[in-house]
Amino acid sequence: MQMNFAYIYRQHKDNLTDNMDKLGILRKKIGEMEELPAMSYTVKLVSRQTAKYNDSTITELTDTILQDFALTNKILRMVNTVYYIKSQFSGKITTISRAVYVLGLEHIRNAALSMVLFENLKNKSLAKELKNNYMTTYVSSIISRELAKIVDKEKCEESFLCAMFYDLGKIITTYYMPDESKLIKDLVSKKGLDDKTASAEVLGISYERIGITLAKDWHLSQQIVHCMHRQPHVKLAKPDNPMDLLRCFVSFAGELCSTILSFHSNHVGWMASLENLIKRYSNCFSVSPEKMIEILKLAIDEVTVYGQNFDFDADDNSFVKISRQLLSSTGFTSATNTTVIPDYAPMATREYEDIGGIQVLDWNMAMSDARETTESILNRGILEVATALLEDLTLNDILRMVIEVMFRGMHCSRIIILIRNPKESVMEGRFGFGENVFTIIKNFRFITDLGADDIFNMALSRGSDLLVKNVNDKRIATKLPEWFMNLIDSETFMIMPIRIGKMPIGLIYMDKPFAGDLQIAPTVLHCLKMLRDQAILAIKQKTK
């Protein structure tokens, strides 16, 4: 068997031309082949994050998530779990906007990334080896997060995220170059090489270097790229700065998972290997072998329950099986029927909680009908905005929540809120959600003239909510300003003025692509008016 492998490997090497650029080939395959499932979306989502917590960042993140209906619902399910609810001030979360405010950008980003990861694990077309890589990555991310909790709680979310990309090069190569990936795995197994050395020998470039290069191509954060660098196999010195400490959390978790996989055939020496790994990192942070076993058990329990809730059987995964065997050999049990609800596990569907004959009337996302009506979305949004008005949110936070509820409930193509610039007497697009909204919003502005007869100034002067069913109707041709017709291609739209007394201070615009698509039932109109009134109340409260 050894001779056969050596022959195959030599043949593979002989077929490679001296000047063949494996990274170039990999980049070409990424461009030509079907993209790694959800990877491009993950990168898009992560790249939208910035170090600054500002309105632009929040709006862009919210819009990105809202563009994917399934992802929106899954994140809302996730953030209404026991773990997340502990962080809330009051009430359940039903809008992405409030989720970002209550939980922070990092929580939402990590929720989205972990959701994408598990969607890939459910994909039956993916090779078993790639699924194993995904599972190892997720467990490594949980371990990294738990280590950060011990040393520096502020690094928890960042540690989780960086660990998600630690093995990017390996995952990409496994998907696009499965034959080469198998040769690398055989080298690791038969010659005892590590991934870095084996991948460099087969590809001429290591997994590590592939991941770092692609991460830079995709403009991932400096922290993510820094944490992808492998640590030397010596006892590490004390980290010089917070970024190096973050790298220690990530690399320790990655090395621990690699160590676990090396014990696939027997368990002899497992605890000694764990203790040696801990000693190597002892200048970086202090953790006992018993604590690491506890963290590993928590990670396996978490992915198991997560898999149960999202129709993925973690017990079929080889990494999970090996981990369970090692835990069992140390006297710890990680049961598949655990009753522990881990950090990211969604709440199970249930009836109202019964406490000795008394039912607790508490709503959760899992109790919702998957076929939600416009009215149910709008009504829930009204309740959440009412709760948010009692919290310390900014005016922009509240206005963003209001239009998000309208956007989701009305299933608009796009929605924009305009605010009057008092210095120029101009209504200007402030922010919005939907198709091409960030380009459109830059030019969505008009001069306020209450004597003008265009539809926008008509709505402001009358204080009336107006619906245009078909922009091509000749009867209203003179009412539609030229700037609007050149900017927007939708055939039907609705506008709702925001006025305090008789003073116009803003306007809400929403549209759909085809004539007749926008239908406003009286019950729906009532909800929309209530949301608009909540926006007015927020403006009054926040501008005192």
Image: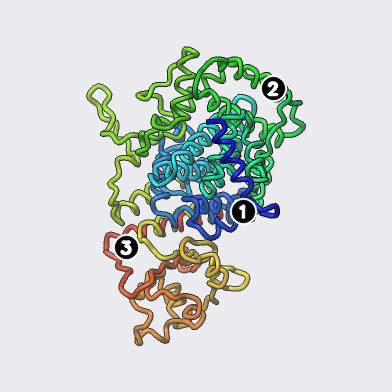
Residue 145 at x, y percent in the picture: 57, 31
Q: Identify residue for label 1.
A: 218
Q: Identify residue for label 2.
A: 280
Task: Point out the tag, 2 or 3, that comes first from the N-terminus.
Answer: 2
Kind of residue at badge 2: Arg
> Residue at the location (53% across, 72% down)?
444
Residue 525 shows which numbered tag? 3
Q: Nearer the viewer, mark 3 or mark 1?
A: 1
Task: Point out the tag, 2 or 1, that comes first from the N-terminus.
Answer: 1
In space, the residues marked 2 and 3 are separated at their CA atoms by 64 Å
Q: Is residue 28 left or right of residue 285?
A: left
Kind of residue at badge 1: Trp
Front residue of this view, candidates 162 and 89: 162
Does any portion of residue 329 appear in the rendered image?
yes
Does any portion of residue 501 appear in the rendered image?
no
Residue 143 at x, y percent in the picture: 55, 29
Front residue of this view, candidates 81 and 203: 203
